[in-house]
Amino acid sequence: MMTRGLPGSREHYTIGETRMETVDLRRDTITLPDDRMRREAFGARLGDSVYGEDPMHEELERRAAECAGMEEGLFLPSGTMGNLVCMRSHTVHGDEIIVEENAHVRTSETGGAGFVGGLMIRTVRGESGAPDPVEVREAIRKDDIHYPRTSLICIETPHHKYGGIVPPLDLFEGIKAVAVEHGLPVHLDGARIFNAALYLGVDVKTITRFADSVMISLSKGLGAPVGSVVCGSRDFMKRARRFRKMLGGGMRQTGWLCACGMVALSEENTARLREDHDNALILARFFAEHPGTAVDLDRVHTNYVVVTVTRQGMNAASFLASMKERGVLASAAGENTVRFVTSKMVKRADVERAVEAARSVLDAG
């Protein structure tokens, strides 16, 4: 039986007389603000951010731009809005954008690029997380009145649909070279870019130098309750601010949320992501070694673990149901595929509990 605790607490799971905290490995979006965030939030000075009078809002945008190595930042309620604002700010209605086939902006943002942005989407496959630059070049439309105009290339890191993998930077470098050759901007969906930078052992700026705009999520692994920032040039931000307002993102007293964002972007907080990566590897190694499951360890780059259930008579749904009975939650990613995502809410002891629960499920007669 699942029971809920006080606001800000984790769910609990009860078996008989034993009450345990649920180990939630569904998504890192479950991360809750910590005590430091709450103190900073409720101590923040407030003002009307649309008028540029909320000091914490202004500070967050400056900090985000500094992290990205770009001229200005823009705070928005969500990453989906941030990506849409950027796509629309780079284009005009009827244009075509080039994206990796399973990019988040195509598969998981409710078709906003087409329905709201009025944009066509042309896809290029890239299972390493980014397409081959040669294929990107081939996807760019010729100047012909019968074709939509290619106006933007979108890239993503880490790549959500491919299990949090981080594309090699030489692919980004090649795509950027193609973009420059054809006079096209590049937008980077960097929702979890600090995870990508940690995996590559580089600064975030090393990744964003291949893009003209970037969206960075402050929630997910970084733990803020709400919000993302987009960064780019000053001229780009003039257009982006207009589209943010058009889409309903012109909020007012945002200082409470932005104070959480400042903590999210702190060096201490971004460095903490290493714990999530380490915990993911513990899970991955167990499933890679167990005869009832399989994991490609070479594709465990960040805090995602994609597991294929190979045990006869078991699929993702039955495996997850049995795990839930033991107080561990994860997500189906296919008929026989399960995804685990570590986060700040999951400690080493929780990961060990998840491993033992999985062992019990897989070894059951």
Image (cartoon, rainbow, N blue to C red):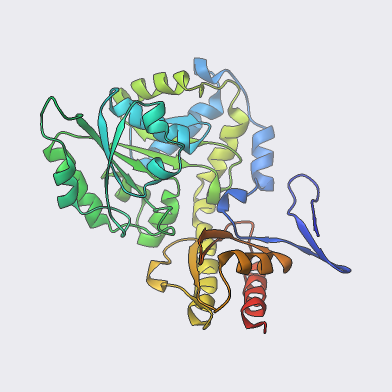
Residue 329 point in image, percent of width and height: 65, 61
Horizontally, residue 326 falls left or right of residue 122, namely right
Q: In percent of the image, x 69 and y 64: which residue is there?
A: 324
Relative vertical location of residue 351 with respect to residue 51 in this rendering, above or below: below
Residue 272 point in image, percent of width and height: 53, 58
Q: Say if residue 359 shows up in the picture.
A: yes
Horizontally, residue 263 falls left or right of residue 187, namely right
Tally of numbered tags: 0
Q: In percent of the image, x 30 and y 22: which residue is there?
A: 93
Q: In percent of the image, x 36 and y 50: which residue is there?
A: 102
Q: Point out the image quarter for the C terminus.
A: bottom right
Relative vertical location of residue 258 with respect to residue 49 in this rendering, above or below: below
Q: Say if residue 177 shows up in the picture.
A: no
Residue 323 point in image, percent of width and height: 66, 68
Q: Point out the image quarter for the N terminus.
A: bottom right
| Image quadrant in which you'd find residue 326 | bottom right
Q: Which residue sits furthest top?
A: 51
* In the foreground, 66 or 25: 25
Horizontally, residue 93 falls left or right of residue 264, namely left
